[in-house]
Every structure is written in structure tokens, then in C-alpha cells.
Image (spheres, helix red, strand yellow):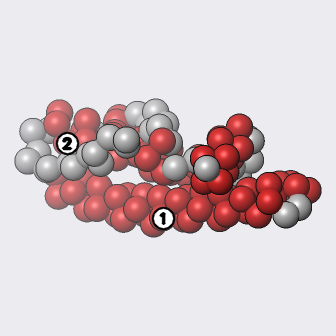
Amino acid sequence: MRKFVTIALCGALTACASKSSDIRASYVSPIQYQSYTCQQLAEEASRVSARASEVAGTQDSARSNDAAMTAVAVVIFWPALFALKGDKQTAAELGRLKGELDAIEQASIRKNCNIKFQKAPPAT
């Protein structure tokens, strides 16, 4: 029950960090990648994917910390709710990185590169 209340409160507060899987890709034009070779596209996809994974970990850590702080605040000291950090900068970077991966994938398809892009399974 306490976990449900924590999740409900964190979801109701705008400062709580979002799950990385819930952050949508920002639009990035694939035109910037049109001059890349298939090799360059693969290397760029690898670089962007590694950074996106790193940022997603940071984002999910922030979410866990915010959820824990919410639980403490609800049980012990409600003014602690104002200490929640939220996720604006990290979420924006993750959205941009996801958009870059989409753009690289589109450029790869247009060039008939044989690069395999794996999508994360849908969140449940």
C-alpha cells in the first residue's frame, strides 16, 4: 500500500523524474546524416546509443531517488517533497539522443545500409 501511495504521489508531482522508457524521442532531422557512409552511420549509432544508455541509467536513478524521497516525505516530513530534483535536463538530453538514433536509422534505411537497430521492448 505504501508503495502505491508513493508512486501515486510521485506521479502527481511534476518534480518527480520520469522513467527513461517513458521519454519520447525528440525530432531530429535525418538530413544531417545524409552525407555519412554506412560505416560512419554505424559508428555514430554506436556512439549515440552508448550515451543514451548512460543517460537512461542516470534518469532511472533519479526516478528511484525521487520515489524514495517521496516515501520519506509522506511518512516523516512533507516539506521534503520540495527537495525532489525532477528530470528536465536529463530527460531533454535522453529525448534528443533517442531522436538522433531515429534519424540515424532513417538515414541508414535510405542508404540501404544493413545496420540492425534494436528497439527497447515496450514498457509495461
- Give the mark, 1 or 2, whose residue is nearer the N terminus: 1
Residue placed at 34% from the left, 46% from the top?
101
Q: Residue beneath label 2, please? A: 108
Residue 31 sits above or below residue 79 on the image: above
The percent coordinates of residue 76 (x first, y second) are 85, 63
Residue 76 visible, this orientation: yes
Which-is-in-front pick, marks 1 and 2? 1
**Between 58 and 75, which is closer to the camera in this rendering?**
75
**Between 105 and 77, which is closer to the camera in this rendering?**
77
Q: Quadrant of residue 63?
A: bottom right
Question: Could you tell me which secondary element the residue under label 1 belongs to?
Answer: helix
Residue placed at 59% from the left, 62% from the top?
64
Location of the C terminus (image quadrant): top left
Q: Residue beneath label 1, please? A: 57
The residues tagged by marks 1 and 2 sit, at their Cα atoms, a distance apart of 27 Å
Residue 118 sits above or below residue 65 on the image: above
The percent coordinates of residue 32 (x first, y second) are 38, 41
Q: What residue type is labelled 2?
A: Ser
Q: Which amino acid does label 1 sit on?
A: Gly
